[in-house]
Amino acid sequence: MKKLVAASIAIGTIAIGAVLWARMEKARGQENLRGVEAVSVARRDIGTAVKATGVIKPMVGAQVNVGSSASGVVMHLYVRIGDRVQKGQLLAVLDSRELTARRDADAAALQLARANLNYAQTDLRRKQELNAAQIIAPSVLDVATQAYAVGEQQYNQAQANLQDATTQLGYTRIFAPIAGVVSAVSTQEGETVTAGFATPNFVTLLDLSRLEVWAYVDEMDIGRIRIGQNASFTVDTYGDHEFEGQVSAIYPEPQIRNNVVDYVTVLRFKPPSQYTLRPEMTTTVNIDLARHKGVFALPLRAVRSEGGRQYVMCRRGGAIQRIWVTTGMRDDSYWEITSGLQEGDQVVVGDAKTQ
């Protein structure tokens, strides 16, 4: 009986000791992990890119200064800054009374020239019949022929004059050549405009759906830029949104600013439906040179090197273990992890002791 009691006490003592040892080991492990920063292995896009600053510019033909070839007083101006207009919409009307009177006078002159031409044609036909009967002298026929030719040219001139007057009258009505937004108004109702060597400007129209980015790429990087490369950019007003684009042109002329040589690289992009971009907005541009999408990645400071090999300190089962890994592409912040880890693995960033 005493032996059984002694055995039970010994077994209990051993069990209590094992529990206390496990708790001490757990506490020691937790002490080792306390204060250790860890990150999870996650998928992300990794790539190398050329960075540049730039501005948003209208494409060729996206910004139009609308004027008139006619002179006169502005009778009506139907738009203001910020208004949206459609192509062919009436924007302004000039005083057309003088040009209307000219048009009417030229129309009357055309009718007179037509009547004179008809008379000359009838007279020539009659003189030709009389000349055939040898009733009149040939000189009389020559005079009739000349009169018809003159009448024909006068009729053509009257036609041209009427067409010109009609065209000039049409210039008194100003229509929108493109659809867009009115970005500037240079003339007001009641002002007199004079069409001379320079066409008077009424309004400026801007098509916000036809914008592009001019990225100023440093001369050290321009050799790596190719037409067709993917790019992205941000603007200050929408700092949390990244817009996608593509390189469409590289201008040959340099832009020298503060003794720094840059080259304009043009990015074309699809107009965003939920955001409004405007000319001269400052952009931060990234032009992709190479990119791997959806790969395992870790911050640069989480990957360590030893003997030409790379490893990480991975948290597993309450302990920290050294795991050898294979890396691929890197960017300014992350390494691509091609083998050695799984998604969700916890990797230590700071100093830690291995188990």
Image: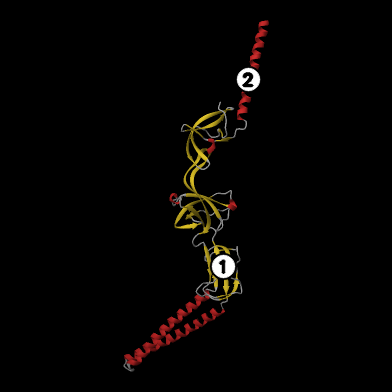
Amino acid on which disc 2 is placed:
Trp
Residue matched to label 1? 203
Residue at disc 2, secondary structure: helix
Q: Quadrant of the C terminus?
A: top right
Which residue lies under the disc numbered 2? 21
Q: Secondary structure at mark 1?
A: strand
Q: CA distance from mark 2 to mark 1?
A: 86 Å
**Neighbourhood count class around disc 1 (C-alpha, 10 Å): few under 14, some 14–19, many 20 upward:** many
Dot 2 or dot 1, earlier in sequence: 2
Q: How is the image coloured?
A: secondary structure
Front-most of residues 146 and 141: 146
Q: Looking at the picture, which amino acid does disc 1 mark?
A: Val
**Depth check, front residue: 251 or 172:** 251
Answer with the quarter of the image where residue 20 lies. Answer: top right
Asked if residue 87 is positioned above or below residue 130 in the image, the reply reads above
Q: Name which residue lies at 53% across and 56% down.
A: 55
The residue sitting at the front extreme is: 259
